[in-house]
Amino acid sequence: MPKPIPPLALPPQPAKQAGVVLFIALIALIVMSLAAVALIRSVDTNTLIAGNIGFKQAALISADSGVETAITWLSSQTSLDNELNSNGYYATSADAAQGLADGDNAQPATGSRINSAGLDDSGNRIKYVIQRMCRNAGAANTSHCLYGPAGEDENSKSHCDLSNPCLGEPTGALLYRITTKVTGPKNTVSYSQTFVY
């Protein structure tokens, strides 16, 4: 008699899932999404900061145009003893230079690459004011004005200080402070100050 064939063994039935793996996978997906958003924001912020630094540097470079315009104006004047506020010139250093550069009397820079409104090729608006480094308006004298060196040679410069005051008439030229305000296309503001004599 032939042997009976044993019944085929059925594979074991998998245990019923309770959905825990799906829940953990969803949490991991949310965490990775938040990390991706944070990374994108970080890169975006760094790009904005780098762009702002670039705009500020460009504005500072444009300030040279304002200084050159002011020097040209200074050299064309015959008398600078009194205030010429409507031209952006102040015969005293008493007022805060930054406030003057923000005021209505600040003059727009001019030049080959600057339009009549004081805008250069980069879209920077350039304005300047000039202050004579004296305490009072009127004729300059040693008691209330600052003077530059006596000559271009380093050895011929006058060295006046508290321990070695200069007596008599000064031999150097009067000092002038030029304050330039540059407003960039994204409202970036740079101030620059230059002393000339």
Image (cartoon, helix red, strand yellow):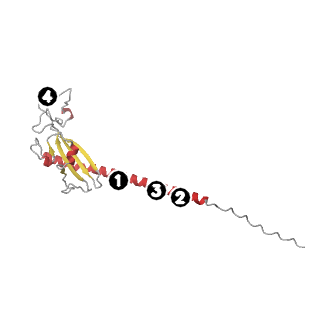
Residue 86, position as x, y percentages in the image: 13, 49
Which residue is tagged 2?
Answer: 29
Labelled pair 2, 3 in contact (Cβ < 8 Å): no
Tag 3 or tag 2, which sits nearer the N-term?
A: 2
Tag 2 or tag 1, which sits nearer the N-term?
A: 2
Q: In this view, does 50 lie above or below 164?
A: below
- The residue shown at (52%, 57%) is 30
Identify the secondary structure beneath mark 1.
helix
User: What is the three-letter code of the residue carrying label 2?
Assistant: Leu
- The residue shown at (29%, 51%) is 188
Give me the disc on residue 69.
none
User: What is the three-letter code of the residue carrying label 4?
Assistant: Leu
Mark 3 closeness class: few <14, some 14–19, many ≥20 residues within 10 Å: few
Mark 1 closeness class: few <14, some 14–19, many ≥20 residues within 10 Å: few
Tag 4 or tag 2, which sits nearer the N-term?
A: 2
User: What is the three-letter code of the residue carrying label 3?
Assistant: Val
Tag 4 or tag 3, which sits nearer the N-term?
A: 3
